[in-house]
Amino acid sequence: MGLLSDPVRRRALARLVLRLNAPLWALPVAWLERTMRSVGLEVYTQSFSRKLPFPDETHERYMVSGTNVYGILRAPRAASTESLVLTVPCGSDSTNSQAVGLLLALAAHFRGQIYWAKDIVFLVTEHDLLGTEAWLEAYHDVNVTGMQSSPLQGRAGAIQAAVALELSSDVVTSLDVAVEGLNGQLPNLDLLNLFQTFCQKGGLLCTLQGKLQPQDWTSLDGPLQGLQTLLLMVLRQASGRPHGSHGLFLRYRVEALTLRGINSFRQYKYDLVAVGKALEGMFRKLNHLLERLHQSFFLYLLPGLSRFVSIGLYMPAVGFLLLVLGLKALELWMQLHEAGMGLEEPGGAPGPSVPLPPSQGVGLASLVAPLLISQAMGLALYVLPVLGQHVATQHFPVAEAEAVVLTLLAIYAAGLALPHNTHRVISTQAPDRGWMALKLVALIYLALQLGCIALTNFSLGFLLATTMVPTAALAKPHGPRTLYAALLVLTSPAATLLGSLFLWRELQEAPLSLAEGWQLFLAALAQGVLEHHTYGALLFPLLSLGLYPCWLLFWNVLFWK
């Protein structure tokens, strides 16, 4: 018997959706508890609070407090050692109320079945990702983000998989799946294949990155559409943001997806019964798991739901880019060695070699000043914006979020003036060999960083490598310095972020004007800092503490005198 196959369950679902169509300015905790208990679940609540480092103007919140409600359906055929999670994140409005109604309808239907071998947790979180993070930290008894929350009174088994559901209407034209998680993590590919299988079985239209799947891969339009979808995934994964509640589950090695119901102007529409049947099929298949999903890929790129690019195919691209840095570093090392050998007297008598004069040698001490100043600028870029926001608001007519962004931009621009003058504080030893030695260190430093980033988040490593490697190899104090300076600025981390935003909106067929792009860039800076302090996203510290100081070293090389 399928989900809601009788009219009684259909009417119950309709009443739930109608009840939840009222604005949900606060989560109806008491009503959710009563409803979950009425269908036979073990119901618990969790309160949490979080003070953000500065006000989140996008969601209009600063001092956040809320309550999560979850019900546990115990497996009648096994001990509570493993579990599955169906979660619905709720914000400050009622845009996801239909998903809450579907969750309760599924809970009532699942309660009447006897084949469950795993506990099923039905979780409704408040304040979107903040509530999800509070529940996950309490469930795993850790605190990695400074969240203040009450301990959980009830637990199920080890979570094997999770599905997050977001619905903005009681009818959908397609289901869009989001796979990108925190810091570029991805779920096991088998979970995505499971979703696609049940969408096809139920006749549901499924999309990826909001794009329909190419029907004909043999013509030119199919590969071009696949390339567009793949580029959208690369940009979203490179951001390191969790694009849905599932992204926080991936941190705890829980395979998870976010399913979003899209109600567009397409002709064919589906009600919540069709969506519920697909979810029921997915949970029944996951219920049969004997071990965690591990047979398929964890590292992949998706041009479509039916095709993927494995790590063995895309990783050589980054390898070749890093090879350019290695060969350039080897060339500089050989030039430094030849310059040192050329100073020895040819045909001299055998014996100990004549030491180089102090004015012709390059010691490591001469590189300390530019390295320290560049790293100090990166540390200031990481620490000062959040620490100095209150000082900025007292002396300037700006809000806290604006103060953070403006401080970021000021420190970033100040770095262009300070590091390229660092050679004035060191001894004037062999200026030509000085910039060559500094560039050698910078090339090795950049190669190590990009290699480590590409292993954890390929998309981010590839984007940074394609922009930074060519200009890093060309940078030198001789030749067309103005051209080299313009190229360095255009391929700096900030310019790469700005260009990625324009490309992202262009691929979504919603191009930006220059003013809109700049405003989106400022909002992305604020969100990047906020998500690092709130969820532990690593993009901001990677750019400020690693790549920005490394980029300043090449700026130093360019203006070496």
Image: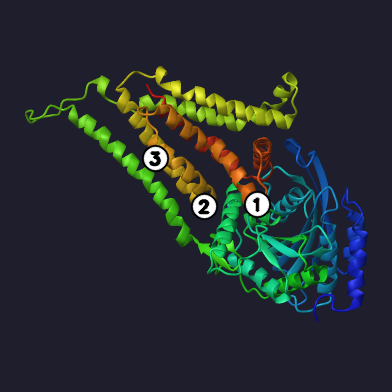
Amino acid on which disc 1 is placed:
Gln
| Residue in the picture at 83% in, 54% down | 95
Q: Position of residue 171 (x, y in %)?
A: 82, 64
Amino acid on which disc 3 is placed:
Ile
10 Å neighbourhood of mark 2: few (<14), some, or many (≥20)? many
**In front: 265, or 381?**
265
- Give the alpha-carbon distance from disc 1 to disc 3, as whole Å: 37 Å
Answer with mark 2 or mark 1, whichever residue precedes in sequence.
2
Answer with mark 1 or mark 3, whichever residue precedes in sequence.
3
| Residue in the picture at 67% in, 52% down | 243
Camera-near label (1 vs 3) is 1
Answer with mark 2 or mark 3, whichever residue precedes in sequence.
3
Mark 3: secondary structure: helix
**In front: 99, or 45?**
99
Image marks 1 and 3: residues in contact by CB distance under 8 Å: no
* Disc 2: which residue: 458
Q: Is residue 104 toward the left or the right of residue 227 in the image?
A: right
